[in-house]
Amino acid sequence: MSAKLKSFILTALIFALVSVVNAQVQTDSTVVVHKKPQGVNALKGKWFLQPVLASDTATGHIPEILFDISQSHFTGNTGCNRMSGSFVATDTSLQFSNKMITTRMVCTGYNESAFLQNLLRVDNYKFRRGVLIFTVNGMEVFRWTRKITPAKKTGNT
């Protein structure tokens, strides 16, 4: 083998070895950071009402809401009827449009009207230990979680 060929092969091997080592270092140094969404993006996705009273779920269904942040649109269920509409949100404020659409099934034993009226009054939101809290003038009116939570039993049931 000629000296030029040996030199070329040796150079190619060194180059290949350096390239492989460099690729491994770059791959290993890539750090994937999973941050919790913040601000409006933290609203994204499906939330279930944390019922306070058994009457909050008199129909047997837990109210739910699904936020589509990119479209400023929500869909969900009141616990009886389907609902959808638009909303405006900042990092702490939230306001639902009064042009909400709902289906019109009868909800015996459930005060759906009060639920919808309170939803339309919401002006802010906050998070506490993974719970989404809607407020009206600083007072909590709803608590929402990512998982369904059954209503607490009272001594009268």
Image (tube, grey):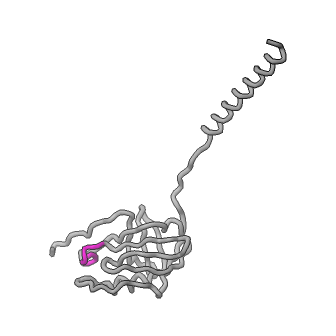
In the rendered image, the vertical position of residue 94 relative to residue 35, given as above or below: below
Query: Where is residue 139 shown, x and y percent of the image?
Result: 41, 78
Quarter of image, res 89: bottom right
Q: Which residue sits at x=52%, y=73%?
A: 92
Residue 132 relative to residue 51: left or right? right
Classify the position of the N terminus by image quarter: top right
Magenta stretch: includes residue 103: no
Q: Which residue sits at x=24%, y=69%?
A: 152
Classify the position of the C terminus by image quarter: bottom left
Query: Where is residue 77 shown, x and y percent of the image?
Result: 36, 76
Residues drawn in magenta: 55-61
Quarter of image, res 51: bottom left
Q: Which residue sits at x=66%, y=31%?
A: 20
In the rendered image, the vertical position of residue 80 relative to residue 21, given as above or below: below
- In the image, farthest residue toward the right: 4
The tally of labels here is 0
Query: Where is residue 27 shown, x and y percent of the image?
Result: 62, 39
Query: Where is residue 72 shown, x and y percent of the image?
Result: 53, 75
Q: Which residue sits at x=27%, y=86%?
A: 106
Magenta stretch: includes residue 58: yes
Quarter of image, res 16: top right
* Viewer-closest of 50 and 65: 65
- In the image, farthest residue toward the front: 1
* Viewer-closest of 106 and 31: 106
- In the image, farthest residue toward the left: 156
Residue 24 relative to residue 93: left or right? right
